[in-house]
Image (tube, rainbow, N blue to C red):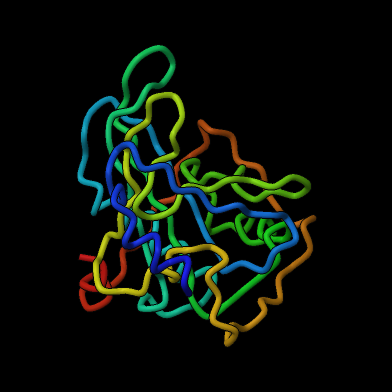
C-alpha cells in the first residue's frame, strides 16, 4: 500500500506534532478493532492491564489466536475533569476477519467486554469518524501522546482499521439487540491472563 509507505517516510512521523488520522465511514469494511481507555491518578503497570484485561477479552470473544492480534498504545498524562490523569490507552486490531464498521457494536456488546474501560463510542453508525493512526497524535486539546505499536516487526497496514488484504473472513455476529450497556462505574470483569507462551507475543 503506497499510503502506508508514505506514512512511514513522513519526516514528522512519530513526533508529538504529527497528526495522522484515518477516515472511517460507517459502511466501510474493517477489521475488528477495540479501544481500551482508563484514567488513573498515578502511573501503573500497563503491561499487566494488557495481559489481564485487554487480550483475554478479545481472544476469547472472537476465538482467535493471540498471534492474530496487533496492539498499539499511547499511555501518558492527559487532561481530565479539570486536572491531569494518567491515561491507559490501548487499541487492538484483529487480523483475518472483517465487519462493516456500523455493525461492530454487535461485537463490543458481548459479555467479554463488560469492563468499563472498553470504549463503545468508536464505532460510527451514521457519520464518518476520524481515528488517529500509528505514528500520529489526535491533534486536539493539546494531547501529544503518540500511538505506537506495543511490539515492533509487523506491517504498517496491520495497524490500520481499513487495512485489509482481501483474504479476511466476514464475521457472522448476533443482531444488535444483544448489545449491552455498561455504566462507566460498572464492575470490572477480571479474567485469567493468557498463558506464558502467549503473553510473550506482546512483550
Whole-percent x, y for residue 112 in the image:
53, 59
Residue 173, located in which quarter of the rendered image? bottom right
Dividing the image into 4 quarters, which one contains the C terminus?
bottom left
Whole-percent x, y for residue 105 in the image:
67, 55
Residue placed most toward the observer, 40 or 99:
99
Q: Residue at x 75, y 49 (%)?
A: 125
Q: Is residue 183 above or below residue 100?
A: above
Residue lying at the far bottom in this picture: please name it: 167
Residue lying at the far top in this picture: please name it: 82
Q: Residue at x 21, y 73 (%)?
A: 196
Residue placed most toward the observer, 107 or 97:
97
Residue placed most toward the observer, 6 or 23:
6
Whole-percent x, y for residue 94 in the image:
48, 70
**151 to the left or right of 105:** left
Q: Is residue 183 above or below residue 52?
A: above
Whole-percent x, y for residue 116 in the image:
50, 41
**194 to the left or right of 35:** left
**99 to the left or right of 159:** right
Q: Residue at x 54, y 49 (%)?
A: 114
Q: How many marks?
A: 0
Q: Residue at x 29, y 51 (%)?
A: 11
Amino acid at each position: 500500500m503506497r499510503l502506508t509507505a508514505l506514512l512511514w517516510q513522513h519526516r514528522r512521523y512519530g513526533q508529538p506534532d504529527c497528526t495522522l488520522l484515518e477516515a472511517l465511514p460507517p459502511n466501510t469494511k474493517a477489521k475488528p478493532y477495540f479501544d481500551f481507555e482508563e484514567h488513573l491518578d498515578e502511573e501503573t503497570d500497563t503491561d499487566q492491564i494488557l495481559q489481564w484485561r485487554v487480550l483475554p477479552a478479545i481472544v476469547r470473544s472472537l476465538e482467535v489466536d493471540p498471534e492474530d492480534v496487533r496492539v498499539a498504545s499511547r499511555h501518558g498524562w492527559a487532561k481530565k475533569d479539570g486536572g491531569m490523569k494518567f491515561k491507559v490507552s490501548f487499541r487492538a486490531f484483529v487480523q483475518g476477519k472483517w465487519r462493516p464498521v456500523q455493525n461492530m457494536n454487535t461485537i463490543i456488546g458481548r459479555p467479554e467486554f463488560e469492563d468499563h474501560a472498553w470504549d463503545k463510542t468508536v464505532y460510527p453508525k451514521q457519520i464518518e469518524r476520524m481515528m488517529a493512526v500509528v505514528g500520529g497524535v489526535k491533534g486536539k486539546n493539546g494531547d501529544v501522546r503518540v500511538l505506537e505499536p506495543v511490539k515492533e516487526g509487523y506491517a504498517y497496514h496491520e495497524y490500520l482499521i481499513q487495512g485489509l488484504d482481501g483474504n479476511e473472513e466476514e464475521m457472522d455476529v448476533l443482531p444488535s439487540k444483544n448489545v449491552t450497556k455498561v455504566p462507566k462505574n460498572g464492575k470490572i470483569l477480571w479474567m485469567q491472563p493468557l498463558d506464558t507462551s502467549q503473553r510473550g507475543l506482546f512483550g
